[in-house]
Amino acid sequence: MSKRLAQLAVIAAIVTAAFWFRARERLPESPEAAVNALFDAAAQGDDAAYLRLLGGELRKTLESSRGQLGESAFRASLRRSAAGIKGLAVSRGEQAPPDRVALDLDLVFADRTERQRMLLVDTGRGFTIVAMEGAAMMKPPVAYGTPVYDEGAVPSPAPANPGGGNSTAVPSTATRW
């Protein structure tokens, strides 16, 4: 009886390990989720999660970079690449090859916006990023975080309505550019 119990325990352990490894290897179910997961992994310096989200030559190139830099320096490089990002806008791009999904990204920093395109493929287990174009930098006319209205302004009372109706004007505190 104890031999049978030991066998069942081993089988249960193998099944649990298989589910654990399968769940760990699961990839994001949408291209947008894959891009968000990539930037999350970069911000955390999680090189294993970052590389798992990549495929093809891109992955091979970055694995080689990790080998040359060393794991610690590669992780620090990932964290630096995500440092200062204030926002990320992701939209479906046009003119993607038939077997790929193109995403156009706008990475918003305090002093600039970087526009970049990524190509992803559906592996059947989820999406991986197989290509990243170089980012084009754009200087916004107004830096991120600049107030667009005067927070200290006190609205003046609305002028009397000469027509006698029930509508009132709402004063604006927005500043013009």
Image (tube, helix red, strand yellow):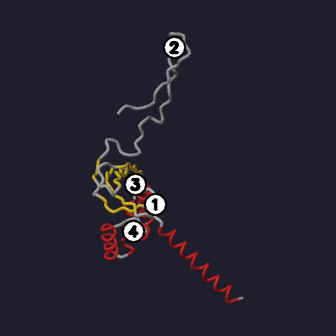
Residue 3, given in percent of the width and then of the height, sits at 67, 89
Q: Earlier in the sequence, mark 1 or mark 3?
A: 1
Mark 3 burial class by Cα count in 10 Å: few <14, some 14-19, many 20+ = some
Work out which residue is located at the far right of the displayed protein and give it: 1
Residue type at the position of mark 4: Leu
Estimate the spatial distance between the alpha carbons at disc 1 and disc 3, rounded to whole Å: 22 Å
Q: In the image, residue 87 lies at what x, y percent? A: 41, 50
Q: Which mark is residue 161?
A: 2
Relative to 150, 14 lies left or right:
right
Q: Amino acid at mark 3?
A: Ile
**C-alpha distance separating marks 1 and 2:** 58 Å
Specify the quadrant of the image occupied by residue 165: top right
Q: Which residue is at a point 29% across and 55% down the rendered structure image?
A: 97
| Residue indicated by mark 4 | 51
Tell which tag, 4 or 1, sits nearer the viewer: 1
Disc number placed over residue 28 in the picture, else none: 1
